[in-house]
Image (cartoon, helix red, strand yellow):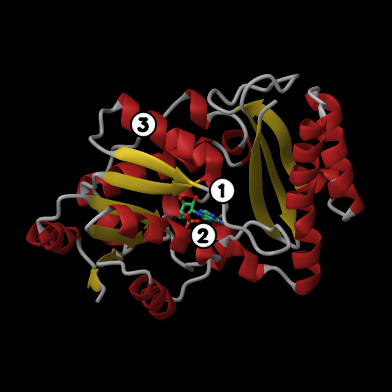
């Protein structure tokens, strides 16, 4: 049984009423898929109250058209949440989350600056951090679950929670993929079948880099060049690639060699849809 709360007051009352010992929270923007479900199942195994939020956060979209095209299907999401054993589904409207009086925003600094911060501008992670800060204060979970799929977002949230002393543990869960390697994303439903085929180049490029590291290549210049070749061969031109980068997995500073844990991340627009993916590699 999944109970739906539309207001902050209702959600708080429902959480308090359950008097759970361990509250697990999964923030989402809806259009749920197996990636989201993996976080919910993990929360279900570890917590006695599972809260999921469903809120397409307007302030984190740097591109109005992307926001407007973002898929919505509340009934389907509710059915998914019910199947995953979610106890409370928090689905506020924009006015509930952003009353006209709101003036405070959260800027996380360094982890928000590179990669997505360059491609989407400071507005993106400011929007993410602000809405997650609000959601964490509304739900007050013991554990909040995020996906490795959005690796930089996870680092931004971890930094915010550490710096502002939020009493919550952040757990990062592995990226769930289709059988052809493509990372699941709510935006995938917007891909035409031709673009969907082309989009497999993102994970192929990353896996190729992963294999080359496993074979002993440490220099990131040839690794990234081989990744770009895979993208180019699929018809993804340089102008469609926001970045393909190898960075330190904790600081996100670019690295010339894979010496420690390295995040290889890609963002590209395929068939009009902006997609991101990443892998973690280590020597
Ligand atoms: P979103 O609804 O896209 O904001 O995603 C909500 C949460 O699900 C975020 O923590 C994402 O990182 C996570 N997520 C999205 N796609 C995947 C995936 N393919 N595998 C694992 N987690 C994911």
Q: Are marks 1 and 2 in contact (CB under 8 Å)?
A: yes
Spatial CA span between label 1 and label 3: 19 Å
The answer to whether residue 107 of the structure is visible from this angle is no
The x and y percentages for residue 79 are 38, 78
The answer to whether residue 127 of the structure is visible from this angle is yes
Looking at the image, is mark 2 or mark 3 earlier in the sequence? Answer: 2
The x and y percentages for residue 216 are 81, 27
Q: Is residue 280 above or below residue 54?
A: above
Looking at the image, is mark 1 or mark 3 earlier in the sequence? Answer: 1
Q: Quadrant of the N terminus?
A: bottom left
| Mark 2 CB lies closer than 8 A to ligand 1 | yes
Residue placed most toward the observer, 136 or 183: 183
| Mark 1 CB lies closer than 8 A to ligand 1 | yes
**Which mark, by number, is residue 251?**
none
Q: Secondary structure at mark 3?
A: helix
**Which mark, by number, is residue 160?**
3
**Which mark, by number, is residue 35?**
2
**Which mark, by number, is residue 149?**
1
The quadrant in which residue 278 appears is: top right
């Amino acid at each position: 049984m999944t109970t739906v709360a539309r207001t902050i007051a209702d959600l708080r009352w429902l959480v308090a009423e359950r008097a759970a010992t361990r509250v697990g929270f999964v923030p989402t923007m809806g259009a749920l898929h197996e990636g989201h479900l993996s976080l919910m199942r993990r929360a279900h195994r570890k917590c006695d109250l599972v809260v999921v939020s469903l809120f397409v956060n307007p302030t984190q979209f740097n591109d109005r058209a992307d926001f407007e095209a973002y898929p919505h299907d509340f009934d389907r999401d509710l059915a998914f949440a019910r199947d995953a054993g979610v106890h409370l589904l928090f689905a506020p409207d924009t006015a509930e989350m952003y009353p006209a009086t709101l003036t405070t925003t959260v800027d996380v600094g360094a982890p928000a600056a590179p990669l997505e911060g360059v491609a989407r501008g400071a507005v993106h992670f400011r929007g993410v951090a602000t809405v997650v800060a609000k959601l964490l204060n509304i739900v007050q979970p013991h554990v909040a679950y995020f996906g490795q799929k959005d690796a930089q977002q996870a680092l931004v949230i971890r930094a915010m929670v550490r710096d502002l002393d939020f009493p919550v543990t952040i757990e990062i869960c592995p990226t769930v993929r289709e059988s052809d390697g493509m990372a699941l994303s709510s935006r995938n439903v917007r891909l035409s079948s031709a673009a969907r085929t082309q989009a497999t180049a993102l994970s192929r490029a990353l896996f190729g880099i992963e294999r080359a590291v496993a074979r002993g290549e440490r220099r990131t210049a040839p690794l990234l060049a081989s990744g770009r070749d895979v993208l180019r061969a699929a018809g993804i031109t340089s102008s469609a690639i926001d970045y393909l980068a190898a960075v330190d997995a904790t600081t996100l500073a670019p690295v010339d060699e894979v010496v420690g844990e390295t995040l290889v991340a890609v963002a590209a627009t395929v068939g009009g849809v902006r997609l991101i993916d990443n892998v973690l590699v280590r020597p």
